[in-house]
Amino acid sequence: MIADSSAWVELLRRTGSRSDIQLQQVLRRNERLLLPAVVYQEVLQGARNPQDFIRLQAQLDIVPRFEPEDMHEISRQAALLYARCRWRGFTPRSPNDCLIAACAIEAGEPLLYADRDFEILASIEPQLQLI
Protein backbone atom coordinates (compact mmCIF):
# COMPACT_ATOMS: atom_id res chain seq x y z
CA MET A 1 0.00 0.00 0.00
CA ILE A 2 0.99 3.61 -0.53
CA ALA A 3 -0.48 6.27 1.75
CA ASP A 4 -0.92 9.76 0.38
CA SER A 5 0.23 12.68 2.52
CA SER A 6 -3.44 13.43 3.27
CA ALA A 7 -3.71 10.03 4.99
CA TRP A 8 -0.50 10.68 6.94
CA VAL A 9 -1.87 14.04 8.10
CA GLU A 10 -5.05 12.31 9.29
CA LEU A 11 -2.90 9.83 11.23
CA LEU A 12 -0.65 12.49 12.74
CA ARG A 13 -3.66 14.53 13.85
CA ARG A 14 -5.40 11.39 15.20
CA THR A 15 -8.64 12.40 13.52
CA GLY A 16 -10.29 9.01 13.80
CA SER A 17 -11.10 9.14 10.09
CA ARG A 18 -11.18 6.10 7.84
CA SER A 19 -7.67 6.79 6.52
CA ASP A 20 -6.31 7.46 10.03
CA ILE A 21 -7.64 4.14 11.34
CA GLN A 22 -6.49 2.16 8.29
CA LEU A 23 -2.99 3.62 8.39
CA GLN A 24 -2.77 2.94 12.15
CA GLN A 25 -3.71 -0.70 11.49
CA VAL A 26 -1.17 -1.10 8.68
CA LEU A 27 1.61 0.30 10.87
CA ARG A 28 0.59 -1.73 13.93
CA ARG A 29 0.41 -4.97 11.93
CA ASN A 30 3.63 -4.19 10.04
CA GLU A 31 1.81 -4.69 6.73
CA ARG A 32 3.30 -3.68 3.39
CA LEU A 33 3.58 0.10 3.15
CA LEU A 34 5.77 2.09 0.74
CA LEU A 35 6.70 5.76 0.96
CA PRO A 36 7.31 7.69 -2.27
CA ALA A 37 9.73 10.62 -2.02
CA VAL A 38 6.97 13.10 -2.92
CA VAL A 39 4.85 11.97 0.06
CA TYR A 40 7.92 12.13 2.31
CA GLN A 41 8.49 15.73 1.19
CA GLU A 42 4.86 16.78 1.58
CA VAL A 43 4.59 15.42 5.12
CA LEU A 44 7.92 16.87 6.26
CA GLN A 45 7.24 20.31 4.81
CA GLY A 46 4.18 20.52 7.05
CA ALA A 47 6.29 20.44 10.22
CA ARG A 48 5.33 23.19 12.65
CA ASN A 49 8.86 23.73 13.97
CA PRO A 50 12.37 22.18 13.86
CA GLN A 51 11.57 19.67 16.61
CA ASP A 52 8.42 18.56 14.82
CA PHE A 53 10.44 18.14 11.60
CA ILE A 54 12.93 15.87 13.39
CA ARG A 55 10.11 13.84 14.99
CA LEU A 56 8.29 13.43 11.67
CA GLN A 57 11.49 12.47 9.89
CA ALA A 58 12.21 9.76 12.49
CA GLN A 59 8.69 8.36 12.09
CA LEU A 60 8.81 8.35 8.30
CA ASP A 61 12.35 7.02 8.01
CA ILE A 62 11.24 3.60 9.29
CA VAL A 63 8.79 3.19 6.39
CA PRO A 64 10.29 1.43 3.33
CA ARG A 65 10.80 3.78 0.41
CA PHE A 66 9.27 3.41 -3.00
CA GLU A 67 12.28 3.83 -5.27
CA PRO A 68 11.31 3.35 -8.91
CA GLU A 69 13.79 2.40 -11.59
CA ASP A 70 12.66 5.17 -13.94
CA MET A 71 11.36 8.26 -12.18
CA HIS A 72 11.42 10.11 -15.49
CA GLU A 73 8.79 7.73 -16.88
CA ILE A 74 6.66 8.04 -13.75
CA SER A 75 6.84 11.82 -14.08
CA ARG A 76 5.70 11.51 -17.70
CA GLN A 77 2.80 9.30 -16.64
CA ALA A 78 1.86 11.83 -13.94
CA ALA A 79 1.92 14.66 -16.48
CA LEU A 80 -0.26 12.64 -18.84
CA LEU A 81 -2.75 11.91 -16.04
CA TYR A 82 -2.88 15.62 -15.17
CA ALA A 83 -3.46 16.49 -18.84
CA ARG A 84 -6.17 13.82 -19.21
CA CYS A 85 -7.94 15.34 -16.21
CA ARG A 86 -7.81 18.81 -17.77
CA TRP A 87 -9.03 17.47 -21.11
CA ARG A 88 -12.11 16.20 -19.25
CA GLY A 89 -12.72 19.52 -17.52
CA PHE A 90 -11.12 18.81 -14.15
CA THR A 91 -7.91 20.48 -12.98
CA PRO A 92 -6.34 18.63 -10.04
CA ARG A 93 -5.62 20.94 -7.11
CA SER A 94 -2.11 19.52 -6.77
CA PRO A 95 0.05 18.16 -9.59
CA ASN A 96 1.78 16.11 -6.88
CA ASP A 97 -1.43 14.08 -6.53
CA CYS A 98 -0.91 12.88 -10.09
CA LEU A 99 2.69 11.99 -9.26
CA ILE A 100 1.59 10.05 -6.17
CA ALA A 101 -1.08 8.26 -8.23
CA ALA A 102 1.53 7.37 -10.87
CA CYS A 103 3.80 5.98 -8.13
CA ALA A 104 0.99 3.79 -6.78
CA ILE A 105 0.22 2.50 -10.28
CA GLU A 106 3.90 1.78 -10.98
CA ALA A 107 4.30 -0.01 -7.64
CA GLY A 108 1.13 -2.02 -8.24
CA GLU A 109 -0.09 -0.89 -4.83
CA PRO A 110 -3.44 0.49 -3.71
CA LEU A 111 -3.50 4.09 -2.53
CA LEU A 112 -4.86 5.15 0.86
CA TYR A 113 -6.06 8.74 0.74
CA ALA A 114 -8.14 11.42 2.42
CA ASP A 115 -8.03 13.88 -0.51
CA ARG A 116 -11.17 13.61 -2.66
CA ASP A 117 -9.24 14.50 -5.83
CA PHE A 118 -7.96 10.91 -5.92
CA GLU A 119 -11.49 9.64 -6.56
CA ILE A 120 -11.62 11.76 -9.71
CA LEU A 121 -8.13 10.63 -10.73
CA ALA A 122 -9.22 6.99 -10.32
CA SER A 123 -12.29 7.62 -12.48
CA ILE A 124 -9.98 8.85 -15.24
CA GLU A 125 -7.24 6.25 -14.72
CA PRO A 126 -8.74 2.84 -13.87
CA GLN A 127 -5.33 1.37 -13.02
CA LEU A 128 -5.33 3.54 -9.89
CA GLN A 129 -6.69 1.38 -7.09
CA LEU A 130 -7.98 3.25 -4.04
CA ILE A 131 -8.61 2.03 -0.51
Image (cartoon, helix red, strand yellow):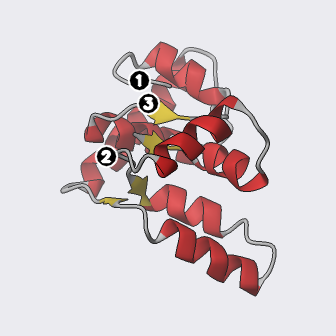
Label 1 and label 3: CA atoms lie apart by 14 Å
Q: Residue at x 40, y 50 (%)?
A: 30
* Residue 125, quarter of picture: top left
Q: Which residue is mark 2?
A: 74
Q: Is residue 128 left or right of residue 113?
A: left
| Amino acid under disc 2 | Ile
Q: Which residue is mark 1?
A: 129
Q: Which mark is residue 81?
A: 3
| Amino acid under disc 1 | Gln
| Amino acid under disc 3 | Leu
Label 3 and label 2: CA atoms lie apart by 10 Å
Q: Residues within 10 Å of mark 3 (few under 14, many from 20)?
A: many
Foreground disc of the pair 1, 3? 1
* Nearer-the-camera pick, 64 or 45: 64
Q: Residue at x 42, y 56 (%)?
A: 35
Q: Residues within 10 Å of mark 2 (few under 14, many from 20)?
A: many
Measured as percent of width and height from the top left, residue 50 is found at: 74, 86
Between disc 2 and disc 1, whose residue precedes?
Answer: 2
Q: Secondary structure at mark 2?
A: helix
Tell which residue pokes out farthest to the front in this image.
29
Measured as percent of width and height from the top left, residue 128 is found at: 40, 25
Q: Residue at x 57, y 36 (%)?
A: 22
Q: Answer yes or no: do the residues labelled 1 and 3 have beta carbons within 8 Å? A: no
Tell which residue pokes out farthest to the bottom in this image.
50
Label 2 and label 1: CA atoms lie apart by 16 Å
Q: Is residue 126 left or right of residue 14?
A: left
Foreground disc of the pair 2, 1? 1
Tell which residue pokes out farthest to the left in this image.
69
Does 38 appear above or below 103? below
Measured as percent of width and height from the top left, residue 130 is found at: 48, 24
Q: Secondary structure at mark 1?
A: loop
